[in-house]
Amino acid sequence: MTDILDDLAWRGLIAQSTDIDTLRGAMAEGPITVYCGFDPTAPSLHVGNLVPLLTLTRLQRAGHRVVGLVGGATGLIGDPSGRSTERSLNSSEVVAEWVARIRVQLEKFLDFSAETGGILVSNLDWTEGMSAIDFLRDVGKHFPVNRMLARESVSARLGGEGLSYTEFSYQILQANDYLELNRRYGCTLQIGGSDQWGNITAGTDLIRRVTGGHVHALTVPLITKVDGTKFGKTAGGAVWLNPEMTSPYAFYQFWLNSDDRDVVKFLKIYSFRSREEIEELEKAAAARPAAREAQRALAEEFTTLLHGADECAAVIAASAALFGQGSLEELPARTLGEALAEVPRAEVPALGASFVDLLAESGLVKSKSEARRTVKEGGAYLNNTKVTDEAYVPSADDLLHGRFLVLRRGKRSVGGVEIVEA
């Protein structure tokens, strides 16, 4: 079997490590325990969180014991890493609700059964009962202030609006998590995003100072697209794992729309396909870029992993049907609605407008005259049926699920109309 660290390196998943050769030696001796933390700063994880999460999943699949930590305590504080301003603090009730939601999402990727020995914890379990005096005497005394000030996440903020003691203390809390997991479960590796390097190495240093033990740190890169923009963002905001925040259709389309120059990199990072399979998809992408085989493979694999095979099949069917390659009538109302939410569309209180008016109102064409020209040229479709009459007025019989109309201009431009009662 391929060495897991070699596999991570091939996939571009190692940004920094404390001592990769020593870590490799420890792994060769038998399974180690590794953890990664996820703070509840929103009611859902987003695709940016997936790089460390999937790396943790790969380590578990390679036979190592994993600890998934949800930051019930650190989520109340706020991490200054990657931020130029102070984070707004959420109430304990909100954070507790978000912790519960994120725990469910982690269980989609990691196996916490007794057979694997996987563990799911919240750092509130050991932080809540610690008094301020105990925290300062037992943990804080091991942190030289000059070294804390030198950390990039701190120094960057000191040159701007400043940093509260609350966020300044975050690195101590995260370091204490590593110490606690080392004591409780023998955890000897922490992974995280490369922006967490300072926080993670604070933990390795704390363990050395308190116990004399040697533990490891490894970070994964922060992913950017070929145009330099941050990965995981769209015009509508972050791409979430929660289907109520990012629909399965939108999630599938996000991966399907990967740039040809990015897709092989994304396959290495986000797919569990083997090196041989990815190299074959790379060849296919180079030989037949228009077919988008690599993008389809990535979108299908990841949508299935997160939302299930049935949901993925429904999304693929909707994607095809919108462009005349399947039955719109057979699509579930929810899936059709989610699909139309991702294309130009109009909301109207009732039927009565002509097809030409609706085509223009949806935004598929710039004007009614352009809509009429589209009809005359034979490029206008209503629910995948060609419209040849400029004066045609859609009726209730045309409505899909009693509320949707699918409009199409030519082969590639799709829009929609939804009846929304006032």
Image (tube, rainbow, N blue to C red):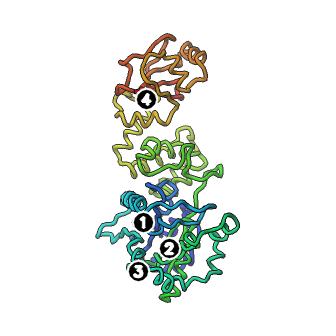
Kindly report which numbered mark, 3 or 1, lies closer to the viewer in this rendering: 1
Residue furthest to the left in view is 114
Kindly report which numbered mark, 2 or 3, lies closer to the viewer in this rendering: 2
For label 2, the SS is: helix
The residue pinned by badge 3 equals 186
Q: Is residue 342 above or below residue 186?
A: above
For the residues labelled 1 and 2, the Cα–Cα distance comes to: 11 Å
Q: Dot 1: within a 10 Å radius of its alpha carbon, few (fewer than 14), some, or many (20 or more) residues?
A: many
Residues marked 3 and 4 touching at CB (< 8 Å): no
Q: Residue at x 49, y 27 (%)?
A: 346
Q: Dot 3: within a 10 Å radius of its alpha carbon, few (fewer than 14), some, or many (20 or more) residues?
A: some
Residue 214 visible in the displayed image: no
Residue type at tag 4: Gln
The residue pinned by badge 1 equals 70
Q: Residue at x 39, y 52 (%)?
A: 305
Q: Name the residue nearer the viewer: 176 or 220.
A: 176
Residue 87 is situated, as x and y percent measured from the top left of the image, at: 56, 61
The residue pinned by badge 2 equals 174
Residue 82 is situated, as x and y percent measured from the top left of the image, at: 60, 62
Residue type at tag 3: Gly
Kindly report which numbered mark, 4 or 2, lies closer to the viewer in this rendering: 2
The residue pinned by badge 4 equals 325
For the residues labelled 4 and 1, the Cα–Cα distance comes to: 43 Å
